[in-house]
Image (spheres, grey):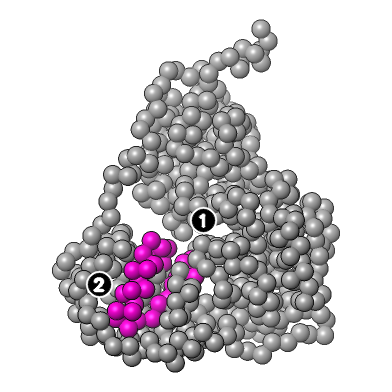
Amino acid sequence: MTDAARFADTRRNFDLLADAFIQEGVDTVFALMGDANMYWATRMADRGCRLTYVRHEHAAVAAALAYARLSGKVGVATVTCGPGLTNTLTALPAAAIARVPLVIFAGEPPLKAAWYNQMIEQAPFVLASGAAYHRMHDPARFTQTVRDAFIQAQVERRPVVLGVPMDLQDLPAAEATLPQPAALLLQKRYPAAPDHRVISELVEQIGAARRVVVLGGLGAQGAVSQARLLAERCDALLATTLPARGLFNDDPFSVGIAGGLSSPLAAELLAEADIVLAFGASLAHHTSMGGKVWPRARTVQVDTDPQVLNQGRAVADLFVQADASSAIEALLERLPARASRWRTPELAERLRQAPAFSETMDRDDQGAFDPRQVVMALDAVIPPDWTIVNTSGHVSSFTAQMQHRPFGRFLTIREFGAIGNGTSFALGAAAARRGEPVVLLDGDGSLLMHIQELETVARHNLPVLVVVLNDGAYGSEIHKLRARGMSDAGAVFGSPDFETIARGFGFTGERLGDLGRLDVLMAGFAASRVPSLIDIPIRQDVVSGQMKRLAASKS
C-alpha cells in the first residue's frame, strides 16, 4: 500500500473538524490555503461545501463579513497560521465593530516543533481586534469547541477565531459523537419583552412630544410593518441608520438615512424632532453626528442589549431592553392615535419629489463627470432587485444617496472606516445571492488596494459588475487637505488603465465617455452575467455634503 493510500485510509482530526462544521450548517467558506488549514479546507470541499478561494487572507474574512450580513448566517473563513492570520487584522475589527458573527478556522504552528518559520503568538493579535480566540489544543474537545464557537459568535455578535495546531489536525481521529448543534440550543432563546414600567414612561414621553421620529436599525428588520404602524399611530416620520438604509423605502413618510449622509430635506426634518425612538440601532456617532442631527430631541434606545456608552458618549436619554417587535407591540397597546399634523399630504409630496442632491451638476472640459450626475444615472438603470455593494471613501457619500434601493439590496459596511474592502464584499455578496447580479460601486483608490480579487471573481465566474468612480486620487484626503489650504500632492495619483487591467483578470472592461451608454452596458451585463468593469472618470472638485460639513467643523 502506498503512503498516499495509507493516509487516505486513516480518519484524521481534520476530518472530524470538518464534520463539526458541516453539522453547524456551513455550506460556504472563504479560504486561502496554507500548511495549517489546507487539509481541513479540502475536506470541507469534499463534503459538498462551496469554497471561494481568494488571493489575500484579508479578502477571505471581509468576504465572510459581507456574506454574513446579507445571508443572516454565520460567516466562515479559513486562513493559515502566522502571516495568514496577521493578514486578517483589518477585516477582524471591522466585523467586531459591525457586530457580525463569524467563525474563522485558523491554523496554528505545530506544537511539537521547537522552531517554525511562521511561529507567532496569535491570540494577542486577535483579542486586540475585538474578536475572540480559542486555542484548540485538546483533540477530545475539538467538536464541542467548534459548536461553542458558533454559539458565541451569534450570542456575542462578533468574530470567533479557532487556532488549531497543524500537527494536532493531522493525528488519527478518535471515535467521537458530535454534540448537539448550535442552532438547536439557540432556538431555546425567546424574544425579550419590555418592562411595563419603562413602557409607561415612554408612552408619557411620546404623548408630550410634538415631532416624533421612529428610527430603524438592523435590529428592527423583523419589525418593519410594526414600526410603520407605530409611526402612523403617533404622527411620526421614519428614518434608518446607514446599514439599514431602505428599511422603510416605500413608505411615503420615510426621510431615508439619518446622520452624516442625510439628504438636505431629511436633515431639515430631523432637526425638528423632539423625540427619537430608535429600534435595534446602536446609535453610533454618525447616526446623530454626536446629537447634532436632532439637537432638541430626547432619544430612546430600544435594543436587546442597549449600550449606555457608544463611541465616547451617552447615546440615549432612556433605554428599553427589549426586541423591537415586543417593544412596538407594547406601545401600540397603550398609545392612542394622534391627528396627522406632521404627516401631511404636502410633506409626503415634498419627500416624493425631493432630489438626492440639490446642487447644479456639470461636466468639465476634460471629460470627467460630476459624481452626483453619475449616481443619478446609475440609480436609473440598475434594476432594484440587483444587489449593490457600497464601500467606504469619498465616493460612497454620493452613492449612498441612491434613492430606489430596497433594504437587503444595498450593502453598506463602514463601521471601521477602512477602504479597500469593495471586491471582498462583492465576493461575499455574490456568494450570499447565488447567481444573482451584484454591482460594486467603488473608488479607484479603494479598488486598487485589493484589485487582485478581481481574478477571484473571474475564476469563480461570479456575476459581479464593478463600477469605478475614478477621480485619480484619495477623494477624502484631497478635500480635507484643500480645506486647510495644504498641498494635496501626496493624495493625487492619476488613473491607471482599469479597462486593460480588468481584461487581464478575465473581465470585460470599458472606460465610459458617455453616460448614455450605461443602459446598454447594463443590459449587456444582465444578459451575459460575465464579470465586468466600467471605469467612470469623475471630477475632483465636487465635494460631498458630508465632507463639506466635516471641513467646516474643523476650519
> In the rendered image, which quarter is residue 339 located in?
bottom left
Mark 2 and mark 1 in contact? Answer it, CB < 8 Å. Answer: no
Determine which residue is flagged by label 1: 70
Q: Residue furthest top?
A: 1
Element type where label 1 sits in the image: helix
Label 2 sits on a secondary structure element that is helix
224 vs 70, nearest the viewer: 224
Query: Height in image: 321 above or below 343?
Result: above
Give the percent coordinates (x, y) of residue 436: 62, 55
Q: Is residue 281 magenta?
A: no
User: Which residue type carries mark 2?
Assistant: Leu
Does 538 appear above or below 466?
below
Start-end of magenta stretch: 217-246
x, y (%) of residue 292? 41, 82
Q: Is residue 225 visible?
A: yes
Q: Which residue is mark 2?
A: 332
For image coordinates 68% across by 54% down, the residue present is: 463
For the point 54% across and 87% down, the residue is 353
Residue type beneath disc 1:
Leu
When asked about the image quadrant of residue 321, the answer is bottom left
Separation (CA) of disc 2 from disc 1 = 30 Å
